[in-house]
Image (cartoon, rainbow, N blue to C red):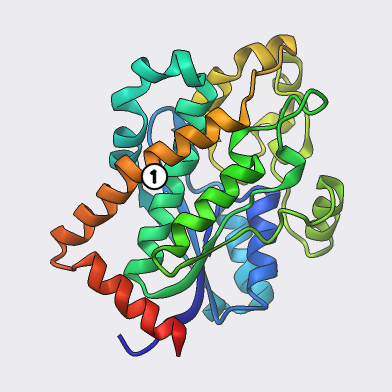
Amino acid sequence: MEKIKKEVAVMFSGGIDSLLAAVLLQKEFDKVHLITFDKGYLEFGLKNNLPNIERLKKTYGEEKFVNKIIDIKDILKKVSIKSLLKEYRYYGMEVVWCVACRLSMNAGALIYALENNLEAYADGSNKDQIPSKENIIGTAENFPKVVQKLKEFASRYYVDFLTPVYDYGGREERRKKLRELGFEIDYLSMDRSKGLKGMLTKDFFFRTQPMCFSGWLIHWKRNLFGIPVKHDEEKTVEYVTKKLENVVKNYIEEYFRKKNINIHELIEKRKKLKEV
């Protein structure tokens, strides 16, 4: 390993947040790897984001972007499914499924960065989606303490976890910026109702990102009746910490062991290169 590449992997759904993250990061990095995750379990349209990927290449250069679909079914099974029935009563279904899914994506992106010798990985986390009484469509993975915990975990592997749109204006400002650049905006990113009324429109079928039907089912009370999900930042952090230390850490070690790579030696190499 001669040096860490000045490249970044973006956890790329194709929604306005990950799309804008790619736009911002292409200025800072030599190459942006657009990685979309196949988690299975009622997920459809993995290639819906291809038009915007082509737009990114056309706008900023073909050589600037790489796009790949990464299978994370195995890590999601270990993080969530094996313990879901035992844990959901305490943590809540959103945490043990949606937060677990995001955690699995982070693990997949971290492994990808390590395996490809990248400097960083990033996602579209943003403060507009922090849960609160006023913001019933917020989701727990956007809690500041959760994002910080993921950053700290990645730093142990000498990989930077970046959240370039976390403090970037509001959703309308992000939509406006992307429209000006000629990108297509996904139905979900238009903030239409996720209830039946909002779904019974022709726009519902306009997708530039995968459709996660399992997520809709998890939030069915909120989507249909406006009943907010009960969120607890401390419990969510507790869950994320437990999974990082007891599942993800071991999964990463086993992943590289199967490839005859000592993860601890890899970490030491990255540490020395970062210190240069």
Residue 160 position within the rendered picture, expressed as x and y whole percent measured from the top left: 52, 67
Q: Residue placed at 61% from the left, 79% from the top?
A: 61
Looking at the image, is 271 positioned above or below residue 90? below
Question: Where residue 11 sits in the image (x, y, percent)?
Answer: 52, 55
Which quadrant is home to the N terminus? Answer: bottom left
* Residue 224 drawn above or below residue 238: above
Amino acid type at circle 1 is Leu
SS assignment at label 1? helix
Q: How many marks?
A: 1
Q: Residue at x 86, y 54 (%)?
A: 176
Asked whether residue 187 appears in the rendered view, the answer is no
The residue indicated by pointer 1 is 244
For this view, does 203 lie left or right of residue 86? right
Residue name at image x 46 percent, y 28 percent: 97
Q: Is residue 247 left or right of residue 119?
A: left
Image coords of residue 52 (percent x, y)? 63, 58
Residue 214 picture location, percent across and down: 49, 24
Q: Nearer the viewer, residue 229 or 73?
A: 229
Determine the residue positioned at 62% across, 32% down. 233
The answer to whether any part of residue 114 appears in the image is: yes
Does residue 127 lie above or below 131 as drawn?
below
Identify whether 71 is placed above or below 134. Answer: below
Q: Quadrant of residue 234?
A: top right
